[in-house]
Amino acid sequence: MQQTNDKHPQNISEKAVPVIPIRDGIIFPSTDSVLTFGRPKSLAALESSFQHERIVCFVLQKNARLNDPNVEDLYSVGTLSRIERMIRADGEINAQVRGLSRVKILSFEKHETFFMARIVEIPDVVEVTAEIKALCNHLTNEFRRAMNFGKSADFLVFMNIMSSENTPAELSDLIASALDLRPQERQELLEMSNVKERLQRLTELLAKEIKVLELERRIASKTQERFEKGAREAMLRERLKTIEKELGEEEGSEIKELMMKLKDAKMPQDIEEKVKKEIKKLSSMNQFNPESGYIRNYVDWIISLPWSIKSKSDVDIKTAERILNEDHYGLDKVKERIVEYLAVHKLAGKMKGPILCFVGPPGVGKTSLGKSIARALGRKFIRVSLGGVRDEAEIRGHRRTYVGALPGRIIQGIKDAETRNPVFMLDEIDKVGADFRGDPSSALLEALDPEQNSEFSDHYLEVPFDLSDVMFVTTANVLDTIPPALRDRLEIIQFSGYTHDEKFHIAKNFLIKKQLESHGLESEHISVTDEALHFIINHYTREAGVRNLERKIAAVMRKIAKKVAEGSKDKITVDEKDVTKYLGPIKFRGTMVEKQDEVGMSTGLAWTEAGGDILFIEVALMPGRGNLTLTGQLGDVMKESAQAAMSYIRARGEKFGLSEKFYQKIDVHVHVPEGAVPKDGPSAGSAITLTGL
Ligand code: ADP
């Protein structure tokens, strides 16, 4: 601001000064402005001001659009101002003017070309109170805030406002000139002679302006955000496109790879066409589509099946025989049957005819014989357990519409075998059950039946797979529970349990060797005496097979392996007396048969899963009325046997020397000890009868 000496203009009372109307601006006292004048009246007034000490009065027109306003069109309060400098250019005058004071126009005097007015100064009404000071402080702070919010103002104006030398009146006018106000609002401020009122009004107006600024800023930042978000999204979308393109190319290569694998799989023509269609579907699919995962899974499954891969299987019967003997002790009958079976197949060419079914207690070498057959035939061996299968889908797969669908166990086994002619062992065929989920045995039948299995259909695959080259071998513990339709197709080979002697030889010749190997031991590390083996068989196992025996031998080997690993160099001999050291206390002592015959007790034979056992039957007679009590968890058949025994004795009472109607005076209680074990079957009948006698 250009400092002048005329902060307080000389008392102009009722002076006549040239009047210049302004369209939309107001010059406030104590402020400097640069104005451009073009209207002839204004120019003339300016020229004439030089005869009036360069003093003019600026007055706002009520209507900015009027080009040549009349006196009625002007407000009656204006600003007395001095022209500080003038530059003429192209019929216009740029003038720097300084506001001096508020004036009231008392009357206009028409001059030739412009208005003259008689004016009187309006003095500021001001009392410097604490309130006014506070108002001033508040205003300057708020003005600074407005600037921070981005208010556009000349820096010089800002500095002037911040100057501490301003009087409240000056400050009010400086701020009024700097605010973004409508002409009427400015006029209103100009007409306020009371400084306090002016300051109050200004705080209102400034607050409004700050609000507007805030809003603008928020809008601007929102717009910016929106713009940035938009830009970011566009950029990301562009990037995604590139990624998709990249992935698309990759997918292209994946599709190519699938097509190549499809060709390599050498599947039947019609199936290949079907899979090709699936792959095409896959290629046109967005990879984010969940269905593409299912299709890929399906295609992977189909092309990974061994459609055309076969083991060369040329059976030399002599070699087969040798291999079976190499792997197993004894089992001569079984081996013979197997060799015959293989011979027939060799002659017939195809795997037609019944399926082998090894029936016998656990651990008698059913599985290992299956492995030997595979070895003898030069085929892969695969084993799938059917224990507990109740659902047809387990055999035949779930339809593809199922979430997480997979092929059934047969196809899974074939995939694992990696050839289409493995020896395929279906374990525990006697434990297949049927319920509401369908009958798994019918699906099994289809897989096993040589007439049908060249077109075995799995629900998941949807296309037939040829199982006719697979050699199926099944195993079961008991025959009774195998569904009859299935049993019809099986060639049953019974494995009876081993005798003690057989177990001993199996252990000596096979199990010890096997366990030495699997524990990384050599025969110079350890020897197990025959006595020790007998002792283990007698006192640590009670089974038809040799599975537990093998486990016990493994336990001994583990302990020895530990010693060897710890640095023991000497050969360790395991003798009978060492066994308890390795295996702990004796487990079985053999059931004691009563040394002396007792009345009311007989001994029966029982079939158990472990082969066989003896059981005792106890009978007690007591005074009563001919009731028969049966205890010891007896099954229906065994109960009936007891009833039959009773009837038999009654019928032949005389022969046995019993008094007439002896049964009316006694009650009979038959008990079979080991009450927690369910017992059934007719075989105990004679024993019960004997006991009764
Ligand atoms: P299963 O399938 O009948 O339950 P495994 O085939 O699993 O029985 O046999 C258990 C273990 O006993 C295997 O290690 C097996 O080699 C062995 N074994 C069973 N019988 C004989 C045998 N006659 N000769 C040699 N080892 C046998």
Image: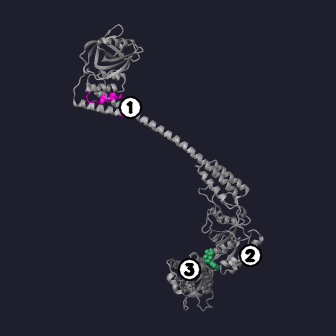
Of the image marks 2 and 1, the number of the one nearer the N terminus: 1
The secondary element bearing badge 2 is classed as: helix
The answer to whether the beta carbon of the residue marked 2 is less than 8 Å from any atom of ligand 1 is no
Magenta residues, as a range?
148-166
Gap in angstroms between the C-alphas marked 2 and 1: 103 Å
Q: Quadrant of residue 98?
A: top left
Left or right? Give the position of 541 relative to 27. right
Residue 159, magenta (yes or no): yes
The residue labelled by disc 2 is 317
Q: Position of residue 539 (x, y in %)?
A: 54, 84
Which residue occupies the foreground of this view, 441 or 630? 441
The residue located at (33%, 13%) in the rendering is: 19
Image vertical order of residue 23 relative to residue 681, above or below: above
Sort mark 1 into few (<14), some (14-19) or many (20+) by Cα contacts within 10 Å. Answer: some
Q: Is residue 328 left or right of residue 213?
A: right
* Residue 454 falls inside the magenta stretch: no
Query: x, y (%) of residue 180?
Result: 36, 26
What residue is shown with label 3?
A: 553
Left or right of residue 27: residue 674: right
Q: Residue at x 25, y 28 (%)?
A: 165
Quadrant holding the C terminus: bottom right
Residue that numbered label 1 is attached to:
212
User: Does the residue tagged 3 have its C-beta within 8 Å of any atom of ligand 1?
Assistant: no
